[in-house]
Image: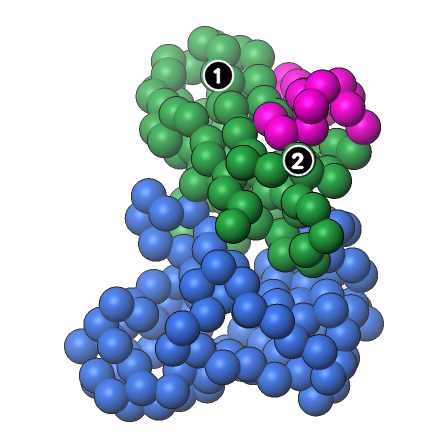
Amino acid sequence: NAGVTQTPKFQVLKTGQSMTLQCAQDMNHEYMSWYRQDPGMGLRLIHYSVGAGITDQGEVPNGYNVSRSTTEDFPLRLLSAAPSQTSVYFCASSYQGTQPQHFGDGTRLSIL
Amino acid sequence: GQQVMQIPQYQHVQEGEDFTTYCNSSTTLSNIQWYKQRPGGHPVFLIQLVKSGEVKKQKRLTFQFGEAKKNSSLHITATQTTDVGTYFCAGKGGATNKLIFGTGTLLAVQP
């Protein structure tokens, strides 16, 4: 099993560009989520999903969109990148939201 | 909204010393999870506590869940250089499905 796979691992964008961070899991997990990690801020929840077709906002959803058309995939879209979105992004999944989270290796995103 | 704070933000110890990090939530939690993140890595699940007042041990690590289910602690006895990393607590409060992470404690261990 691959677990949780995030692509790309690194990305540099210019302000105003859009892009999609990919996340896929092969564990048949219902719960998936996106976090961003910034120094001194811990892991902040952006969006999460409790199953295919269901998404909800986390702590810092502005500037990001998500969709969950399949159980396996949970892409995160940056609509118009801003320097404040420079961060490390982690995708995580679990059977349920209260179960242990399995994290991907992260995407390191820089916005110039 | 729900907030989860951890103290201290950073701790530097000599190898062999003990270490404790504290986690405090603004709301009652249904459970508390602890994760460890090595430098440059991703968070890795350590343990989950569910019951009020629960205490669990993993070798040199002791985890506690407060009686009011609003706070938790992680204690490491006789730290080793392999304990280096950031320790996060995470919990879900109320009726929400959101799993909120704490701010983390970065542990540095000097040989």
- Against A79, residue B35 (above or below) is above
User: Which image quadrant is residue B57 in?
Assistant: top right
User: Which image quadrant is residue B104 in?
Assistant: top left
> On the image, numbered disc 1 is attached to which residue?
B19
Residue depicted at x 49% and y 11%: B18
Residue depicted at x 43% and y 41%: B103
Q: Amino acid at mark 2?
A: Thr
Which residues make up the magenta segment? B51-71
Q: Is residue A17 visible?
A: yes
Of residue B43 and residue A81, the one placed in the foreground of this image is: A81
Q: Chain of mark 1?
A: B
Question: How many numbered badges does the structure rendering display?
Answer: 2
Of residue A69 and residue B107, the one placed in the foreground of this image is: A69
Residue depicted at x 54% and y 46%: B2
Disc 1 or 2, which lies upstream in sequence?
1
Residue depicted at x 41% and y 56%: A37
For residue B28, which numbered disc appears in the image? 2
Of residue A56 and residue B82, the one placed in the foreground of this image is: A56
